[in-house]
Image: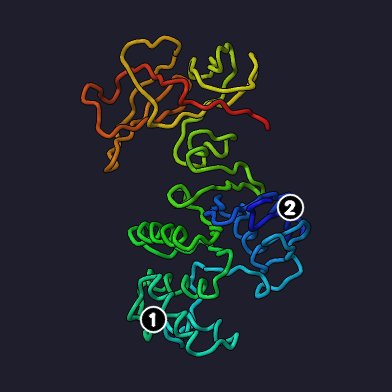
Amino acid sequence: MSDSIVTLIDVEKSFGKNKVVQKMNIEIMQGEFLTLLGPSGCGKTTTLRMIAGFEEATSGIIMVQGERVEDKEPFERDVNTVFQNYALFPHMNVFDNIAYSLKIKKKPRDEIAKKVKEMLELVQLNGYEYRKPDALSGGQKQRVAIARALVNNPKVLLLDEPLGALDLKLRKQMQVELKRLQKKLGITFIYVTHDQEEALTMSDRIAIMNQGIIEQIDSPKEIYEHPVTKFVAGFIGESNIFNGKVIDLSNEILTVETSSGIIKAKGKGFEIGESIYVSIRPEYIKVSKVIIDGFDLKGKIKDFIYMGTVVKTSVDLKDHSEIKYSRFEKDDELCEGDIVNIFWNPEKAVAIKTQI
């Protein structure tokens, strides 16, 4: 028996002739923290809204706990939603905001008081129950919104860029708090964001979306280290991407000819003569003033950029493209204008098909 709690089968959504979600198939597991990640307009929020019932799917099947819900109203689905703008009632205090849905359901007063108290403790807002929203900070408002969404014990919590309105420091703090909360409750979180670091930090799995389709769905580590498309390689983190042609292969190590020079990468299922992409992360790149066997990639150091935790170095290549590498500290032996040989462990470079 499957442990999936939310399933989408061939789900599509069109606005007129504009197809914003295309043939989406995904299974989301019980207790999973899954993030829909992608640029603006990729269809991630529309997907979330279809699960919630705020948007009607043009076609396809949406199931929650094994039951089809396409024809059910939002309040009939065992899901709740947290929005970026909090959507708190400004005239109600914290207690009444959290208790609202319980009062609508005409729950006994003592049960309401007990549940609200539990939620306040859960989101660490004891003593705030009689404050109005305008007396709260952004982080406190978001906690109230989360408590209100959780008070009905939903099986699935949908979060639409809930930290987008917070400043950087508070956003990082809330990322940790949300992940701890999700682990403690064991509730399935489906989270929408365009922030890559946020997705990598919090998720069990990430679904990378682009132009209405899922390009890759996997663990954060797998997506970062083994992107399967050029879009994923370029969208997640920072990556140097080469276009080239396979000229030799041995034990899954490919020798690739590019306009910048000869490089190496790891990959399965490729053939000599095949055009491919090669992705290499800046932290895996090494430089030397001596020639490295298997590589023929030279460049001139353009500049060093100090970024606090790392120093990023840009190198101009012979085809006028640029490659970046990063170190915790600047190499004092190297200066701007130096000619260097560039190389890396071929196991760290990913060969990517030009077409899938």
Q: Which mark is residue 166?
A: none
Is residue 193 or residue 126 the one in the foreground?
126
**Label 2, residues with CA under 10 Å away: few <14, some 14-19, many ≥20:** some
Instruction: Give SS at disc 1.
Output: helix
Q: Which percent across, then down, holds residue 286?
A: 36, 23
Is 259 in front, or is 100?
A: 100
Q: Amino acid at mark 1?
A: Asp
Q: Separation of disc 2 and disc 1 at Cα?
A: 42 Å
Quarter of the rendering containing residue 340: top left
* Dot 1 alpha-carbon crowd within 10 angstroms: few under 14, some 14 to 19, many 20 or more: few
Q: Number of numbered discs present?
A: 2
Q: Nearer the viewer, mark 2 or mark 1?
A: 2
| Three-letter code, disc 2 | Ile
What residue do we see at 73% from left, 58% from top? 13
Q: Which residue is mark 2?
A: 9
Q: Vertical placement of 323 versus 122: above or below?
A: above
Label 2 residue SS: strand
The residue at 40%/17% (across/down) is 298
Kindly check if marks 2 and 1 are in contact, taking CB atoms under 8 A apart as contact: no
Is 246 located above or below residue 174 in the figure? above
Q: Quadrant of the C terminus?
A: top right
Q: In screen coordinates, is 235 left or right of 27?
A: left
The x and y percentages for residue 177 are 39, 61
Nearest the camera: 149 or 135? 149
Mark 1 lies on residue: 134
Mark 2 or mark 1: which comes first in sequence?
Answer: 2
Give the image location of residue 211, x and y in percent: 65, 48
